[in-house]
Image (tube, grey):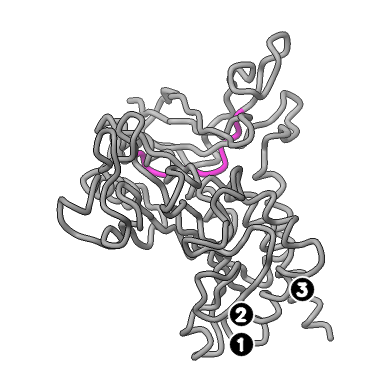
Amino acid sequence: MTFKAEYIWIDGTEPTAKLRSKTKIMAGSAAALDELPIWGFDGSSTNQAVGHASDRVLKPVFSCPDPIRSPENGDVLVMCEVLNIDMTPHESNTRALLRPVAEQFAGQEPIFGIEQEYTFFDGDRPLGFPVGGFPAAQGGYYCGVGSDEIFGREIVEKHLDHCLTAGLAISGINAEVMPGQWEFQVGPVPPLDVADQLWIARWLLYRTAEDFNVSATLDPKPVKGDWNGAGAHTNFSTKAMREGYDAIITACESLGEGSKPMDHVKHYGAGIDDRLTGLHETAPWNEYSYGVSDRGASVRIPWQVEQDKKGYIEDRRPNANVDPYVVTRLVVDTCCTALEKADQL
């Protein structure tokens, strides 16, 4: 008896890393995460090594049923960290930087829900765009219905089913503002979980779209001009924020202190200045603001949070192509440090 394990990792491509994967045939009928062995790959082909010293190591850190192959047979998807051959984290391994921060502030019970926007392309044009031209202006596509406004729903539904079969914390889907543009949400779950699962969900998105001869892109501005970009709005809370409004304000203020806005934005995905222009429901990339129910602010406090005087905040700045290991680390470090100091006063 054998099963298939698809080892998935993040490569060293800059400025935006790509997903890579390969299949390992394992003896037996299933395996727990701690039973999955380390593996190797050619780092010189993934921008993670040079040819004369090319071996890199894959260390399994998260696994789930593989919904595309045979989950009933024990086939699994395996998210991996990339290590050097001395078992130290590779410089491209951003998960290794998140882990100690998540552990340091685990007592505050931080959780995230990330809204992953993306765009389907048919060749060199967004799905739903006519050949050699443009569709009607955006407006009716958002959460729309009907073949004149919605493109790619069959792929979206299949991807959703795959994510649910895999046991991922998918909390919803919707059509977005531009034709061929969609969103799925992962969470709310702790930092490492949301990032691991978002990367797996991205891999499933690309793999599902393959079967329809369509590509999916996380380009933050897939069409120039008067079209919305694609983001990864990052919803965040701690136990204190879920219990009181003062902590909500402390978190919002901490994200705007000193050099923090620029420290965050420069790590929120390549091409962020193309998307964060102050138009199309964004705040300018070089200005920080927060406000209640304000989709033109850097950070939004949902209206019901102000009403309930507790809840969460939404950082609207991260690009669709942001590394979730990076954004969760930055938000936890900044907000939880401020909340810890506030609690000591």
For label 1, count other residues whose C-alpha is less than 10 Å away and answer few (under 14), some (14-19) or many (20+). Answer: some
Q: Secondary structure at mark 1?
A: loop
**Residue at the outermost left position:** 147
Q: Amino acid at mark 1?
A: Gly
Check disc 2 and report the residue beneath it.
Answer: 241
Mark positioned earlier in the residue sequence (1 or 3): 1
Decide which of 192, 4 is in the foreground and name it.
192
Between the C-alphas of marks 1 and 3, the distance is 15 Å
Q: Which mark is residue 244?
A: 1
Reading the image, the residue beneath label 3 is 338
Q: Which residues are magenta?
A: 58-66
Query: Distance from label 3 to label 2 (Cα)?
Result: 12 Å
User: In terms of image quadrants, where is residue 52?
Assistant: top right
Horizontal and vertical percent for residue 198?
A: 48, 49
Residue type at mark 3: give it.
Answer: Ala
The mark that comes first in sequence, 3 or 2, is: 2
Q: Quick check: can you spot residue 127?
A: yes
Residue 78 position in % (x across, y down):
48, 37
